[in-house]
Amino acid sequence: MEIGYYPGCALHGSSNDYEMSVRACLAALGVRLRELDDWICCGATAAHSLNRKLAVALPARNLGLAERDGMHEVLAPCPMCSMQLMKARCLLSADAALQDEISAIVEVEVRGTTRICNLIQIFQQVGYERIRDAAVQRLEACRPACYYGCLLTRPPGVVQFDDCEHPTSMETLLSELGAAPVEWNYKTECCGAGMTMANEATILELGHRILSNAAAHGANCLVVACPMCHVNLDMKQAAVNQRFAAAHDMVVYYLSDLVGLALGLAPAALGIPRHFVVRK
Amino acid sequence: MTTPASNPPAGEFEPKIVAYVCNWCTYLGADLAGTNRLEYPANVRIIRLPCTGRIDFNLIVKAFEIGADAVLVSGCHPGDCHYTSGNYHARRRWILFRELLATLGIETGRVHFAWISAAEGKKFQQVISEITSQTRDLGPYRAYREICEICEV
Amino acid sequence: MARIGVFTCWCGENIARNVDVQSVAEQAAHLPGVRCSRVHKYMCSDPGQKLIRDTIAAEQLDGVVIASCSPHMHLKTFRKAAEHTGLNPYLVEMANIREHCSWVHPERARATAKAVDLIRVAVAKVRHNRALEPIQVPVTRKALVIGGGVAGIQAALDIADAGVPVTLVEREPSIGGKMAGLSETFPTLDCSQCILTPRMVEVAQHPNITLYTCSEVEQVAGYVGNFQVTIRKRARYIDIDKCTGCGQCWNVCPSKKTPSEFDYGLGTRTAIYAPFPQAVPARPVIDRDACLRLTKGRCGLCVKKCQAGAIRFEDQDELVGENVGAIIVATGYQLYEIGKPGEPGRIAGYGEYGYGRYPDVISSLQFERLVSASGPTGGEIRRPSDGAIPKTVVFISCVGSRDNAKGLSYCSKICCMVNAKHTMLYKHKVHDGQAHVFYMDIRAGGKNYDEFVRRAIEQDGAHYHRGRVSKITQEDGRLIVRGVDTLAGEPLTIAADLVVLAAAMRPAAGVEELAQKVNVSYDEFGFLCESHPKLRPVETNAAGVFVCGACQGPKDIPESVTQASAAAGKVLLMFSRDRLYREPEIAHVQESACAGCFTCRRGCPYHAIDSAEIRDRQGQLVRRVARVNPGLCMGCGTCVALCLSKSIDLEGSSEQQVYAMVESLR
């Protein structure tokens, strides 16, 4: 199976452990990733705060590149990227005049025909049972709290994935692999996203609540599918402990980490040792 | 209009407009325009039908044949037809018939379609006023009558 | 040779101010077919009508045109006047020279010219009018009521009390509907069952009512006054005549785990069960999916215990036919299913409230069962999770209603009153409890309704917070309700022991299939459509079919009862004469020209066109032609426009009439 691949700025930047993880895991499942040639930033939070047209044009160029290169489906592992790409696609596919206008701006033809997927959707396409059958070890000791954050399932009209208020797609997959996901209260609560630098106090407060609730419900690790969430919960965990005199010791895995481990890949191949909080 | 009293002063063209309207919506809308004393040009002549679904499009051609300069078909809004679906039939027929009329060389710009409900007296006034002034600008519709004269119909 | 009389009205000043009535009358006299032309100041007045009558007689008129106001105003008046002289009323037409002329055209010359044209059109039409007689349709003086809730019960009793036989069909094993499961009703806090049960018993005992429970309407054929209905009586497995209702059977039934429908899943019931103690009929029924004998061939304890020999495992569904003249649909409502995956196109509902995950988040009907003395907790308000008495209860309004994202844009009307009622019932039972209500607006528009809500707040201490709830989570056995108080301008978090969701009212399941069987239209929510929302709220566009109660739209008990009596009144009106009289301006087929393509039948909104067989003298089938059912045709004329051979025509707007009208404008 081959799909288009849009890493986005985070995966090529400070979260390249997530890229390692995604590439290794999907390779082990026989999914070939074809990276978009000359892709640009999706605009993230900055673009739509400043200029609506820019917020459409930036992701639109990437959609145009995918169309040009004949890719019907593109994986964007970062939910902010995938959401911006999906939003641009929604607006374009319904509006021929906008397609023409944006195509002129981004200098490549865009019709909004490419389907954008997040990481969990790729696993669904491969098939949870196939993944289970390919697994060489069960995740018996794992009691993850699956954390979706804001953007994987919302806005529901754009993303159209899972139950937007009470998603369960990660839990289902991990249960198939032998883990025991916990039922907890902060699945879709915000981690603070891009305020890591600008408003650290809020990030720490939100992170503290998330980590506390996960622990209170018996989780021994957190699973995320977003590089921003990972940064806020993993890299900032020490700061949370310091601010709140807490003793959080929660490993934060990417979903592809756990799937990769189940498939028998070494932690190093998945970039796990690069996390800040490691398993003792 | 053949009565002498209605001939306009020489040089001023007054269009003849035939309106096929449904009894339950547009006719009552026209009544409401009357009750509210909303004035509009006196060029229109209403033919009352139970429903726009009754309108066979030969009636439109007939109207041009007797000298109409514009024709209006008006009924209930989609979804509100007194007989449930008559207006949908009329609308569908119009979509097909428009192509045919255009192919035959009839000026489809002189055929107007409207949805005017029993509560829309004002809209009736506006639609009639607009059509009348548009048709005045288009001028008299001679083409159909000329063909009839040539064929001695 | 036509002898048409034209009568032009001054209408006081209304017409005469802008139309030269004298000139109009003079010009009308010269129109082809016109015998005489008269004027009068007020044509609709007694002297005006006398003028018409006298002229018809004197001039032996065979057609009349009244040039005055709108036909919607006085066509019936003038047709009656003509009838009195022996002239067929359908030979009278009107030219609207008031609403369409004098009132809107101030220029006298042009208004006068238009008036003459309008009369010309009317005269051209009337020359082709035919004398028509109203159509008579025989009536079977028997009614069918579908649905045995409070609306169906009321309608059935009203009709039966008038001496007309009624068949009442109810899908559940007992009548009573949702009202039978309520504890108390607003605004009086009457015990619901106390006021309903006597009615239910009356239905069962009424000599004019035939009651079918565990039954559904399978098929409806025919038309107004003459419906043939097929009813499926599902197997009950009990002979209700032999059964004494002693209860020995359900006391020994070993299959006890089925969630109780009557308790909305809060309690369980046995496989052989009576739905509730006051059920009518007061007889049990066997759930064929839960019964060990019916599914696995084992057990049979109930048969051993039954001293009346009333249990019949060999029961089958039975089909019964009934002929009725009118049908009333009263199928009621169900609650919006919170938390279940949404229908296609609608977003799945309220996963953030935890309904279905947290046992202590329940619906309003479930709360009614908790409060109800015959409920799963004997009327004590106890939490489903641990049976503890909740000290803090949160009620949330508008769950599903007024929510475009969930696809239910409407207000369910009763929930504000239900919430107020629940806070009061709660407080009356748990004196140290505290009720909170999260609301958007308070809708309490009935008699004593607003006072009722004030009582809940002022006397029973309910706290009302204007705002919505964003999320409910569970922490240490309590429900953490996160909402907002918009009047205080602050987020508000309440730790509750029990949360009650006021879910939206939707029409009962299966209503769409039933509506198609009786040819009634329904809106995008499934509510059945009335003929006119203001003036004809219980009739439908299917002649002979009426609606009442919550199936037509969300409403409370007083309104359901009112509509039920209204529908019954309409039925009795229909039955007040031996025959139904319908307007004769309907379609008819010239069978010799009809090719039997049935394009007309496909386009008819009323399914009023049938296929008829033409047979020769030997009984051999020659061909099939279309035939209009005079009992159903509503006279829209869609068929006339569709007919490829112009074999079908419409009285009152025939091809000849319409073409003559247009031609007269040449």
Image (cartoon, coloured by chain):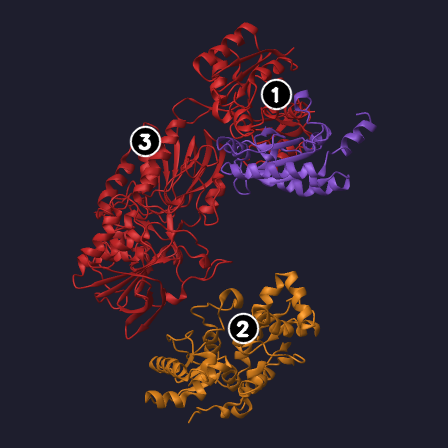
Residue reaching furthest right?
Answer: B150
The label number, if any, that marks residue C545 in the structure image: none
Q: Which chain is purple?
A: B
Q: In the rendering, at what x and y percent does residue C307 appear? A: 24, 47
Residue beneath disc 3: C160
Q: Is residue A38 above or below residue B149?
A: below
Q: In the rendering, at what x and y percent does residue C83 appear? A: 49, 14
Q: Along the horizontal axis of the image, is B70 left or right of C266? A: right
Residue C412 can be seen in this image: yes
Query: Could you tell me which secondary element the residue under label 1 belongs to?
Result: helix
The label number, if any, that marks residue A50 in the structure image: 2
Q: Is residue C26 above or below residue A198?
A: above
In front of the other: C483 or A43: A43
| Residue C448: quarter of image | top left
- The span from disc 2 to disc 3 (Cα, nearest Å) is 72 Å
Q: Is the Cβ of the residue at disc 1 closer than 8 Å to that at disc 2?
A: no
- Badge 2 amino acid: Leu
Q: Is residue C443 above or below residue A274?
A: above
Dot 1: chain letter: C
Dot 3: chain letter: C
In front of the other: C560 or A92: A92
Residue beneath disc 1: C116
- The span from disc 1 to disc 3 (Cα, nearest Å) is 56 Å
Q: Is the Cβ of the residue at disc 1 closer than 8 Å to that at disc 3?
A: no
Q: In the rendering, at what x and y percent does residue C33 appear? A: 64, 13
Q: In the rendering, at what x and y percent does residue C459 appear? A: 18, 55
Residue C425 can be seen in this image: no
Q: Nearer the viewer, mark 1 or mark 3?
A: 1
The quadrant of the rendering that contains the C terminus of chain C is top right
Task: Give the color of chain A as drawn.
Answer: orange
- Badge 3 amino acid: Ala
Residue reaching furthest left?
Answer: C431
